[in-house]
Amino acid sequence: MAGRKTFALTQQEIIDLDKHIRALPFKRRMQDAFLAMISERESMKQLNEEDLKLIQRCRYERNTYNKRIVQLQLIQKTEPQKLKKLELNILELSKKTDIDAYFAMHDALNEVLKIKRNQTSEKNITAKVERVLNPEKYNQAPLSKSLRKQQDHIKYFIGSLYLNLLEQSGLERSNSNEDLDRMLDLFKQAQSGAEKNNAFSLDQNRKTDILSAKSLYEMEKLIKQAKEDPRNPFNKA
């Protein structure tokens, strides 16, 4: 059975923790106990097991305190009408200076953080259940950043290849939608050449004509969509 992770501690951490606790307006019992213990120890070598447990608890409380303060700052920056009742109460408590209001505010902040953790946990569980119930929906995962980058490179390469094809064909680039029309012309020429090279029967030729007409229609539709696409740089020139 694996044991607990070793509690690492440095002298600087004790100094920082001491400064943090002394700066607090009010202290919890374990923090008072920490200050009393530190005043009696001359070096880290004198720390016993109980001392280390106390330090660990105080360090955990400091980390939680910092999270509460961040949450308090978020609440203070949020418009009051968007806050829940508990958060509004926290705002009121933050304006008071007595010890009861101080600890009540921090207890309330702990509750807010707990609610957020539960919401995150519930969201994760819901997503996990959805993946089991609707695997076909989640199997179509969004493209990773590296895969999107790879596909972008392919698109740029094919686009560059087409522009080179225009130049090799003796067609001048117009840097306008006419370049898209030339793409359609090249498609028609390639289609026409393929039909002449195929020796089919009459029935096969009829089928080929139907397929060619459909392909041409789809190509014309694609060119039209490209011309109307808001990303089309030719429309912005």
Image: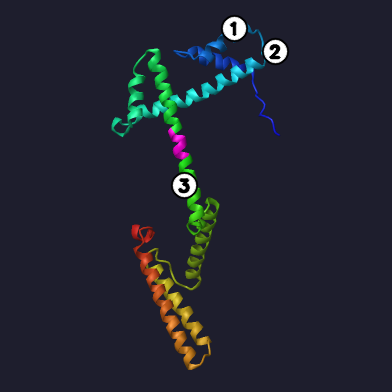
Q: Is residue 200 left or right of residue 70?
A: right
Q: Residue at x 47, y 14 (%)?
A: 24
Residue 39 circle label: 1
Above/below status of 64 relative to 128: above
| Image coordinates for residue 39, horizontal then vertical, percent | 59, 7
In the image, what residue type sits under mark 3?
Thr
Q: Residue at x 39, y 21 (%)?
A: 105
- Can residue 237 be seen in the rendering of this structure? no
In three-dimensional space, the C-alpha distance between marks 3 and 2, rounded to whole angstroms, equals: 50 Å
Q: Which residue is mark 2?
A: 45
Most foreground residue, 221 or 8: 8
Label 3 with label 2: CB-CB less than 8 Å: no
The C terminus appears in which quarter of the rendering?
A: bottom left
Comes first in the chain, label 3 or label 2: 2
Q: Residue furthest front?
A: 1
Question: Magenta span covers which residues?
Answer: 115-120
In three-dimensional space, the C-alpha distance between marks 3 and 1, rounded to whole angstroms, equals: 51 Å
The N terminus appears in which quarter of the rendering?
A: top right
Q: Which residue is mark 3?
A: 126
In the image, what residue type sits under mark 2?
Lys
Q: Residue at x 44, y 39 (%)?
A: 119
| Image coordinates for residue 219, horizontal then vertical, percent | 41, 73
| Image coordinates for residue 52, horizontal then vertical, percent | 63, 18
Q: Is residue 213 left or right of residue 10?
A: left
Mark 1 burial class by Cα count in 10 Å: few <14, some 14-19, many 20+: few
Mark 3 burial class by Cα count in 10 Å: few <14, some 14-19, many 20+: few
Comparing labels 3 and 1, the label whose residue is closer to the camera = 3
In three-dimensional space, the C-alpha distance between marks 2 and 1, rounded to whole angstroms, equals: 14 Å
Overall secondary structure of the magenta section: helix
